[in-house]
Image: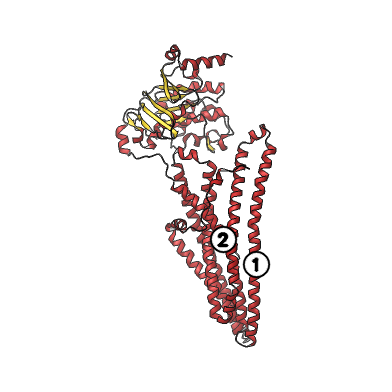
């Protein structure tokens, strides 16, 4: 199976103190929960350590003395402390999880806010699946760091240290015997840690390959079937799946070997305690209750030891996830937005009388933008030294319809991208109403310039929500926008009308209907400049007829830029810009360009001949 993009992930350090400090910094708003968690952890740990000591007292003072009253009181006290330990353990678990969930919420919000503010350049270089992984599973590993690793590890260390201290308080001689059996356990733990680290890395690499391969093949299943690649794909998946199985078995082997050996050492230690303790009992230097307490404490000591390897793997996973989350969070490739509201509002003043009153949306203010667009010697490249726009200069007056045509790769869509500042140009200047667009706040600019793209994006939710996209407008205004593009009747005839739920990618309606709804969305938001990027290229003849009926209302009084392959749709444009290899080759009206017999004339004749054929 081919290597995936995920294989480029670096293996992080086993433990990164800098990263841990950064993760813990998110606890600052929840100091009260941290305090409660730590207090509950300390109290429950002390209670657990006190139980074996209390058991020793009950046995020695009550049973051996045959004092029923002491036995009853001792059992009652034991039961009370047991409930006490349970209560504080519950409190510690609840506050730790509450604190963790709030921290995870904060991290996800920060990460999503950071991601949606990144430039198109950044988003185009990173697969969507990888970004989703950062926001979900990688953040989830940090959740495990708090709940499973940090708090549990603190309690395990406290229990182990507390047990050793308690053993020496009860009987230094017997405690020294126990201590002599521990070095092999610590050596085994170090070996297991290394083995667990290697197994984790192999498992992580193998799972990344399998997930990436599945995502790619499932997304392109039609191609797999059409080109009869089922058998080849199955064999490739079998190979990757076998690697994942081997990696998982390797990880299981570490735990399957480590746990029984630790339990064997635990049993050996208890056997040594029993032998030495029995001899001490015979010499009257140790009581029965003390021996039973020692056995209980030894069991308590080895219980967290068996979890160390597993917690170490979770720690590594948390380090890897945290490294990726903060790497994305530290990325700063957003489109600069340094201007102020004051500068913008003072520069963009005119009348909105260009827009018909029936199509105005009063809830959104456009600062009276006229829609005068100017490109002055604009150069732009997606990749260094590979210019797509090579000194483009043109202007579109307010209310004009400008059409951009040219062969594929000429730079048509790029003009739209730089005009709405999805990308920033390398040199030159683009102005809106005489103001460089870099001096206009992004929200103002994008409220004023809105596209209808060739690939329509509708979200899961109601049709109404997809038209408004959070804009606070009345039902009447929504319906007016839908009527303007002749989609109201279709929506009204649906069982739930505008409240009809759209499935993922709006797969439950046709391509043409999705396009019409996107038109209605633009009208509802009432921009001053409308961009149609191949907006009718994938629509059937009847739907295109409906759009052509409403297109004049859509563009009336607005500046519009239309990109179209079908030149018959732009005959009436006020200005036609013909691009060739990133440069403006021709400019003029349809008849003028046809009479010149240049590039546009050749394109038009070619389409006419194809149509007649």
Q: Give the mark toward the camera: 1 or 2.
A: 1
Q: Crowding at label 1, few (<14), some or many (≥20) Cα neighbours within 10 Å?
A: some
Quadrant in the picture for residue 434: top left
Residue depicted at 64% across the width and 64% down the height: 259
**Which of 151/210 is in front?**
210
Quarter of the image for the C terminus: give it. Answer: top right
Do we see residue 171 in this rendering? no
Please report whichever mark, 1 or 2, sits nearer to the chain's N-terminal start: 1
Q: Position of residue 226 (x, y in %)?
A: 66, 31
Q: Crowding at label 2, few (<14), some or many (≥20) Cα neighbours within 10 Å?
A: many
Q: Secondary structure at mark 2?
A: helix
> What whole-number distance in Å separates the C-alpha atoms at marks 1 and 2?
17 Å
Q: Position of residue 212 (x, y in %)?
A: 59, 43
Determine whether, in the image, residue 124 is placed left or right of residue 310: left
Reading the image, the residue beneath label 1 is 261
**Which of 126/517 is in front?**
126
Q: Position of residue 74 (x, y in %)?
A: 58, 80
Quarter of the image for the N terminus: give it. Answer: top right
Instruction: Describe the colour scheme in one phrase.
Output: secondary structure
- 120 is higher (above) or lower (below) than 165: above
On residue 117, the disc is none
- 59 is higher (above) or lower (below) than 400: below
Q: Position of residue 359 (x, y in %)?
A: 42, 27
- 86 is higher (above) or lower (below) than 555: below
Reading the image, the residue beneath label 2 is 311
**Which of 309/300 is in front?**
309
């Amino acid at each position: 199976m081919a290597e995936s993009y995920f294989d480029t992930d670096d293996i992080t350090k086993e433990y990164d103190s800098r990263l841990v400090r950064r993760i813990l910094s998110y606890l600052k708003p929840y100091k009260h929960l941290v305090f409660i968690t730590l207090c509950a952890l300390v109290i429950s740990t002390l209670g657990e350590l006190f139980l074996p000591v209390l058991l020793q007292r009950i046995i020695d003072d009550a049973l051996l003395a045959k004092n029923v009253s002491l036995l009853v009181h001792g059992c009652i006290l034991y039961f009370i402390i047991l409930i006490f330990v349970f209560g504080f353990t519950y409190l510690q678990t609840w506050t730790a999880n509450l604190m963790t969930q709030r921290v995870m919420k904060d991290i996800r919000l920060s990460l999503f806010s950071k991601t949606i503010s990144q430039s198109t350049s950044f988003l185009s270089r990173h697969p969507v699946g990888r970004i989703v992984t950062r926001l979900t599973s990688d953040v989830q590993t940090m959740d495990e760091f708090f709940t499973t690793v940090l708090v549990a590890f603190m309690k395990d260390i406290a229990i182990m240290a507390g047990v050793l201290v308690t053993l020496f308080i009860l009987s230094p001689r017997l405690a020294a015997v126990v201590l002599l059996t521990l070095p092999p356990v610590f050596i085994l733990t170090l070996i297991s840690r290394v083995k667990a680290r290697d197994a984790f890395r192999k498992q992580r690499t193998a799972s990344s390959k399998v997930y990436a391969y599945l995502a790619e093949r499932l997304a392109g299943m039609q191609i797999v079937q059409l080109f009869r690649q089922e058998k080849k794909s199955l064999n490739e998946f079998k190979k990757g799946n076998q690697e994942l199985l081997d990696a998982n078995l390797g990880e299981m082997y570490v735990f399957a070997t480590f746990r029984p050996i630790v339990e064997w050492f635990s049993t050996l230690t208890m056997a040594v305690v029993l032998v030495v303790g029995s001899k001490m009992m015979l010499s009257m230097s140790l009581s029965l209750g003390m021996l039973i307490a020692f056995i209980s404490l030894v069991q308590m000591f080895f219980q967290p030891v068996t979890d160390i390897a597993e917690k170490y793997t979770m720690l590594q996973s948390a380090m890897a996830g945290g490294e990726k989350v903060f790497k994305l969070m530290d990325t700063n490739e957003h489109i600069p937005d340094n201007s102020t509201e004051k500068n913008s509002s003072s520069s963009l003043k005119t009348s909105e009388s260009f827009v018909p009153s029936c199509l105005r949306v009063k809830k959104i203010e456009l600062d009276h933008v006229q829609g005068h667009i100017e490109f002055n010697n604009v150069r732009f490249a997606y990749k260094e030294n590979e210019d797509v726009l090579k000194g483009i200069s043109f202007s579109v007056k307010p209310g004009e319809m400008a059409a951009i045509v040219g062969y594929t790769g000429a730079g048509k869509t790029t003009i739209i991208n730089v005009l709405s500042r999805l990308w920033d140009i390398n040199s030159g200047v683009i102005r809106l109403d005489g103001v460089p667009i870099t001096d206009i706040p992004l929200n103002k600019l994008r409220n004023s310039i809105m596209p209808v793209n060739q690939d329509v994006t509708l979200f899961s939710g109601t049709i109404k929500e997809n038209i408004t996209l959070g804009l606070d407008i009345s039902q009447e205004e929504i319906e007016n926008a839908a009527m303007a593009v002749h989609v109201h009747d279709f929506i009204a005839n649906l069982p739930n009308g505008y409240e009809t739920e759209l499935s993922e990618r709006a797969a439950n309606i046709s391509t043409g209907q999705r396009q019409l709804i996107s038109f209605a969305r633009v009208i509802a938001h009432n921009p001053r400049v409308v961009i149609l990027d191949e907006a009718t290229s994938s629509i059937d003849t009847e739907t295109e007829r409906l759009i052509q009926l409403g297109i004049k209302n859509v563009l009336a009084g607005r500046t519009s830029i239309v990109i179209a392959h079908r030149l018959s749709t732009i005959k009436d444009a006020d200005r036609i810009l013909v691009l060739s290899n990133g440069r403006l080759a021709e400019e003029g009206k349809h008849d003028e360009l046809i009479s010149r017999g240049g590039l546009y004339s050749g394109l038009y004749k070619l389409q006419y001949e194809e149509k007649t054929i």
